[in-house]
Image (cartoon, rainbow, N blue to C red):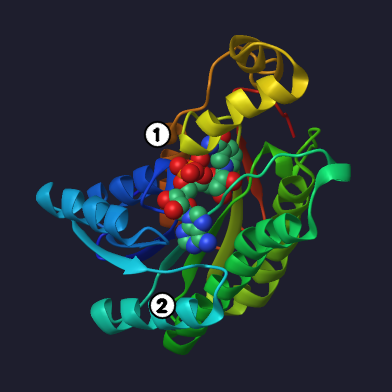
Amino acid sequence: MNRLDGKVCVVTGAASGIGRRIAEVYARAGGRVAIADLQLEAAEAAARQIRDDGGDALAVAMDVADEAQVVDGIAAVVAHYGRIDVLVSNAGIQIVNRLVDFSLADWRRMLAIHLDGAFLTTRECLRDMERRGSGGAIIYMGSVHSHLASPLKAPYVTAKHGLLGLARTVAKEGARHGVRANVICPGFVRTPLVDKQIPEQAKEFGISEEEVVRNIMLKDTVDGEFTTVDDVANVALALAAFETNALTGQSLVVSHGWFMQ
Ligand code: NAD
């Protein structure tokens, strides 16, 4: 159970936070991991750490919103490892602002990274999976915001909802090639992405940082706890290792009960 022996796994945004822990957990489960990230130095450091721990990892420079970089980056992974079995489309950023203050440039940047990035990496990996005919798993990093909305997060909420539609379509098109597609929807996880939001929200709402955590971020959880990178990585491992089309087109919410489906 939950082994990835020899499977080639591309994880985008794996130089930091959730993606980095997924890459580490996949490598420990026997996966060969491509760490695709905008930050090449940090990706190389993450890959080196995995190799030092006895795993197999490759760093790949990739802006997921740039078609040529995605095409070249996925081709580099196939050239190195010969195949792709698992894609985790995880790279993401957050920009918070009131809708009336959002610039079109920021809106487009958010949709480009979250949605264009998911589309481009899916297309390139799916082409390899279909060509080889031995199936695969595609996992999107959604959010509780794939299912509900919060103020100040219009493009994030829009993009994360959009990933549900993409996953369901990929589940239908991929089924006859043995390709499954699912979305993981975490609650708040303490990563650089969230640490940046706490002072921003405190300023926007005129409350303390502690109140942002207690009264906004964790208010509706069952236990007032943050979700951890390990919680999310273990679900990502289960989805990557799951063998049949029984589990496809789904979203799994990992949020300490913040959102219940
Ligand atoms: P993080 O900031 O720790 O890591 C994000 C990584 O993505 C970084 O290494 C960054 O360099 C990379 N990245 C950003 N833009 C990129 C691009 N254009 N191309 C390639 N790489 C790029 O953030 P995180 O919290 O680990 O977030 C990872 C994913 O999880 C995101 O999609 C985020 O929306 C989602 N998520 C996070 C939380 C949370 O609370 N942290 C909750 C739900 C969902």
Using residue 98 as the reference point, say whether residue 156 is left or right of it: left
Q: Residue at x 33, y 76 (%)?
A: 77
In this view of the protein, can residue 133 be seen by the observer? yes
Circle 1 SS class: helix
Q: Residue at x 36, y 47 (%)?
A: 20
Above/below status of 69 relative to 255: below
Using residue 181 as the reference point, say whether residue 60 is left or right of it: left
Above/below status of 41 relative to 205: below
Q: Quadrant of the C terminus?
A: top right
Residue 239 placement (x, y as % from top left)? 48, 51
Category of crowding for the residue at label 1, using alpha-carbon neighbours closer than 10 angstroms: few (below 14), some (14–19), many (at least 20): some
Circle 2 SS class: helix
Q: What residue would you read off at disc 1? A: 230
Category of crowding for the residue at label 2, using alpha-carbon neighbours closer than 10 angstroms: few (below 14), some (14–19), many (at least 20): many
Q: What residue would you read off at disc 2? A: 74
Give the quarter of the image for residue 174.
Answer: bottom right
Residue 33 placement (x, y as % from top left)? 30, 61
Residue 180 placement (x, y as % from top left)? 56, 65
Q: Which amino acid, mark 1?
A: Asp
Q: Which amino acid, mark 2?
A: Ile
